[in-house]
Amino acid sequence: MAVRENHNEMKRIFLLFLAAVLFGSTCVADEPDSVYIFSYARAQDEGRSGLLFAWSRDQQNWHPVGNGFGFVKSDYGRWGSEKRMIRPFLFYDADDLWHCIWNLDNKEGAVAYTSSKDLLYWMPQSYFISQKALKRFTPEKMNAERSRQQQIVIAGAAETGVIKKVPWNIVSGLIKKEQLSGYRSRLWGETTKEDARRFAGLKPLKLVISPEPAGAKKISNLLMGVFFEDINYAADGGLYAELIQNRDFEYAPSDKENRDPAWNSKKAWSLSGNGAEFTIDSVHPVHPNNKNYAVLKTAGGQTGVINEGFDGIAVTAGERYDFSLFVRSMSGKKKALAIRLIGRQGEELAAASVKEPTGEWQQLRTVLIARKTAAGARLEIVLQPESVIAIDMVSLFPQKTFRARKNGLRADLAASIADLHPRFVRFPGGCVAHGDGLENIYHWKNTIGPLEARKPQRNLWGYHQTAGLGYFEYFQFCEDIGAAPLPVVAAGVPCQNSARHGHPLGGQQGGIPLDEMDRYIQDVLDLIEWANGSAQTKWGSLRAAAGHPEPFNLKYIGIGNEDLISEVFTERFTLIYKAVKEKYPAITIIGTAGPFFEGADYTEGWKLATKLGVPMIDEHYYVPPAWFIYNQDFYDKYDRAGPRVYLGEYAAHLPDRPNNLETALAEAIHLTALERNGDVVHMASYAPLLAKENHTQWNPDLIYFNNTTIKRTTGYYIQQLFGQNAGDEYIPAKAMYSDNNEKVKNRVAWSIVRNSHTKELIIKMVNLLPVPATLSLDMDSFRFSNPTIIKTVLKGRPDEKDLVPVQTAVVINEIRTIELAPYSFTVLRIKP
């Protein structure tokens, strides 16, 4: 850990020096010994820019530090508009610390607190219901400090804040940090749109690579995996093959952040025919976890109830679909139900019937065989005259699911994930795992057992989760595709982006109360028993009853997801970690280090992991493509004796968030660096994985889909090529360039790995330049005689989105000198 910290500190000092050279050490020719500093939050944006500074020699002429550069921003509340720093006040005390306290709303209610030694590095934030909860500071002290707030004019606007007299080096440090941030933003903001100017006159690059097989090192064979989260309708309406929307009548306005009244228990349902009633009841439900059901009452004629599916129901001619529902008669009259699939114009596509319902809940089943192919079919349940029935858990599943599993997965989407050759699958997500508030934390026990007994809930991303795709299905899918399961549980706190939802405090909401933590910790321990225990154990028996008597062989579990490393989190994470480690020492526990590659949560997350001996840390970052170009050494100096890294979420983000060749090649550059550091980076997964057209909350994603088709992005093929061409040994190499310009060299990357079992050699090469690169490859040290060689190339314009790799067979002499096309990714797979 110390080596990595020193490396990052050296990089920071170098960049500060570089910024000073580029921009000048300060803007002041005659540096004073001391000046006045004014700290404030901008009134016009209600503090969304964070804590700002201005300085003055005489308290008359004030100079802003940067153009609205926030040195610390409030991380409280929902994303975007709720993250405000209201009326902050800054003060310094005898502990040699700067303290910043601000309000979290426009009332004298919840407050936030953070501290800093130098005004540059700020500790993770803490949130309190009232100022009285800040026990470290007496109300008298805080009132005295707040009374010192003054109003001055900054850039023509009246601002309220605190004036302090400080040594000049304090202000100088702030100026340099803002300059460094601006420099990095420009550097990392480079895109291929400027390549014609940036590389004007650049000649084709010549590159000589000399592998050194004697220096081969073992690397992780679990490096390439997938991250699954129920975002962008990835589960219901997506990977989960159920075709009926709101099958359980449990949709509610509270699923939506704006409490949409149209999003209710009748969502996706409508009546056909006249003279019928359609109401929702909750007396005597099928199961207490599934409290709502529909009551249908007909008068003289036939009528029915129609479900529209998720943007329609896609059916294929000749295919069979399993229909089921729970039903009971409420009129004492037993009358059969007709079941139909109908087209957009009302034409019948398939028909069947179920027997007469009784007076008690019973599950009835039938099979519908589609006579025509249709993308927008609907399901109709037809009632006979003078009927009163209750229905619930209305379901329609294609029989052709992935591996023909009941309650299974959509075959083409699941196959696309399997085709990535993932070594592990993370689930049930990122933010979904710890949820929007305490009541929305994802509890695995709610997602196992019979479907009617599972407990649905609102999705943090603004829709509904049926829990039909639950922990049993996740583990089963991992087993089907030969991937290690990696469940992630909340660390006793919800997402720091949580809203209040009736709680007096948003954000982490104080976490699960400590007197309830024993029960929550037991739930985590029960998960491991459910996955790995014998069929004779309490929880293992439930797994066996579901159809899997053998253990799932769980080896990894994540605790937390890019959390704020607050005192609330630290206390609860430590309790869970120690309990799991004590009872299940063979399980590899994965901790968390915030949502960024730097900052307080990153640093404090690593410190906590090192202190506790956590074996692996989950890092996340979404960054511009040029970040990957200029940070290829990011993991080179990590401490090899410290915790391993799981890069759980990453992606290259351009403006407007496309997934194109430019982003894909930048990610390929990073993946070559991950392979080079495969001894410390144990796992990695791009995020997010799936997105449904017209229901997408986040871009870019790897796979886009609608009800009938899927689109594998260019980024998908990069991930697939790394997954299909993984190795467990990394072979270092020396390189010589015809052009030693760093901007040129940084846009060419390679990785050489070997599969120690098959003895296959895999060479991956990235060219993110607008000119070709001629690569001379010294193959003599491998002593191949007549190998089989497959060459795969993905190339095109940087802005192209629909590229597909092309594969050809070549001979040994053809790879001694290879031309790497402009903007291309090339893989050589050599089998002795």
Image: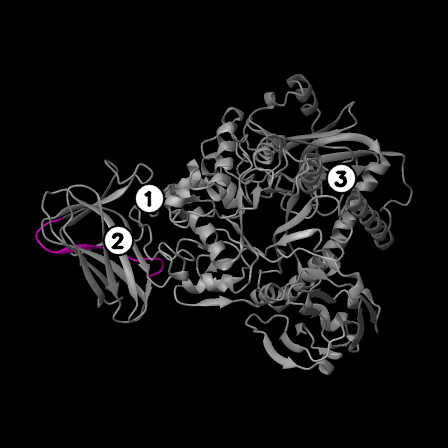
Mark 2 or 1: the one toward you: 2
Q: Is residue 683 visible?
A: yes
**N-term-proximal mark, 2 vs 1:** 1
Q: Quick one: label 1, few (<14), some, or many (20+) residues within 10 Å?
A: many
Mark 3 vs 1, N-terminal side: 3
The quadrant the C terminus occupies is bottom right
Magenta highlight on residue 305: yes
Image: 459 above or below 720: above
Marker disc for residue 324: 2
Which residues lie in the magenta part?
A: 298-312
Q: Nearer the viewer, residue 449 or 121?
A: 449
Q: Could you give the CA–CA distance between mark 2 and mark 1, rounded to whole angstroms?
A: 17 Å
Of marks 3 and 1, the one in the foreground: 1
**Residue 777 percent across, percent down from the top left:** 77, 75
| Rendered position, 78 above or below 313 | above
Mark with earlier residue (2, 3): 3
Identify the image's colour scheme: rainbow, by chain, secondary structure or one colour: one colour
Residue 211 image offset from top left, x and y in percent: 79, 68
Characterize the magenta stretch by its predominant secondary structure. Answer: loop
Q: Secondary structure at mark 1?
A: loop
Assign the N terminus to one quadrant of the image.
top right
In the picture of the structure, the residue carrying the numbered disc 3 is: 120
Residue pointed to by mark 1: 250
Can residue 705 be seen in the rendering of this structure? Answer: no
Residue located 26% across and 59% down the image? 379
- Disc 3 is placed on an element classified as loop
Q: Nearer the viewer, mark 2 or mark 3?
A: 2
